[in-house]
Image (cartoon, grey):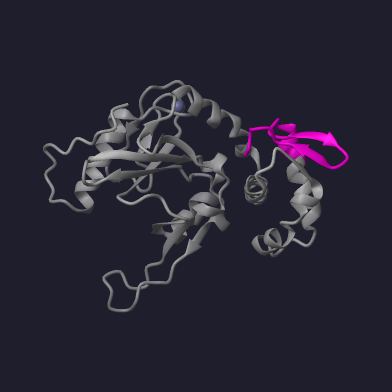
Amino acid sequence: MDLSLDISGIPHKRGTQFVRVLTERWFERNMFCPACQSDYLKKTATNTKVIDFFCPMCDEKFQLKSFYHPLGAEVVDSAYKPKIDAIKNGTIPNFAFLHYDNQRWVVKDLVLVPRYFIYPELIKKRKPLKRGAKRAGWVGSTIVMSRLPSRAKIAIVHNGYEISREDIRKMWKDITFVKDLSLSSKGWLSDVMACIEKMDKEVFSLQDIYSYREELARLHPKNRNIEAKIRQQLQLLRDRGVIEFLGKGRYNVGRSLV
Ligand SMILES: [Zn+2]
């Protein structure tokens, strides 16, 4: 992977279009498929909405978003409704967030969020554009990145360093089981995984995780039986080998989550 961005021959002034061409060109030349053994991704036809790249071998789809600043807790994104519709009908692509240095023109960070971790509550509605604006009434969205567990934010490039392709594919594979869950289960599992990470312990107890009861209740206001839901997620994580039951309400995450 060559982390430098090739700014030569781009027929646009420095601005949104310039950056789009620049980063898409880099992604096309350097990115591989994390979901299979394909060593490249292909660009979709220019007018395809939402999807930018796809894998010619397994057909996973990727949308690239680029920023000149590090990735924050929230990411401003495109229109709200089409995104929610795409989540509900299962056509949401994987997201690739690229942070570049606009002085030295290099890629600093590249993070992938697998599509299975994108559930409706992760997308916040923005205020409609005011009357008189070019697209008055248009409603954009924000992706709440801070709500996601770090396992759902797979680093390809971290602080200017490349992560090994083998490690990335393994990380991707380890969490693909989330794909088969219902939308509400995805949200629950993701939130409980994030709580386990926040504890930052190798061994935790049921009481430890129950201390996030109120926080989880706020995130899932319709659910009355929070503790049962927490236990259900722990069971699922155990069945998938992410955590281990030690007995007597104790769990081991080893170094797999923290
Ligand atoms: Zn693939």
| Horizontal side of residue 243 vs 110, given as left or right | right
What range of the chain is rendered magenta?
235-258
Name above or below for residue 57 compared with residue 90. Answer: above
Taking depth in this image into account, of 100 and 92 the one nearest to the observer is 100
Rendered location of residue 247, percent (x, y): 86, 36
Taking depth in this image into account, of 174 and 85 the one nearest to the observer is 174
Could you tell me which quadrant the N terminus lies in?
A: top left
Ligand 1 position by quadrant? top left
Q: How many marks?
A: 0
Q: Is residue 247 magenta?
A: yes
Rendered location of residue 173, percent (x, y): 56, 28
Taking depth in this image into account, of 144 and 160 the one nearest to the observer is 160
Determine the image quadrant of residue 155: top left
Residue in view at x 30 percent, y 50 percent: 68
Rendered location of residue 228, percent (x, y): 81, 52
Q: Is residue 17 magenta?
A: no
| Horizontal side of residue 241 vs 109, given as left or right | right
Rendered location of residue 218, percent (x, y): 67, 64
Name above or below for residue 199 compared with residue 28. Answer: below
Could you tell me which quadrant the C terminus lies in?
A: top right
Residue in view at x 65 percent, y 52 percent: 184
Determine the image quadrant of residue 130: bottom left
Please, which residue is most extreme toward the right here?
248
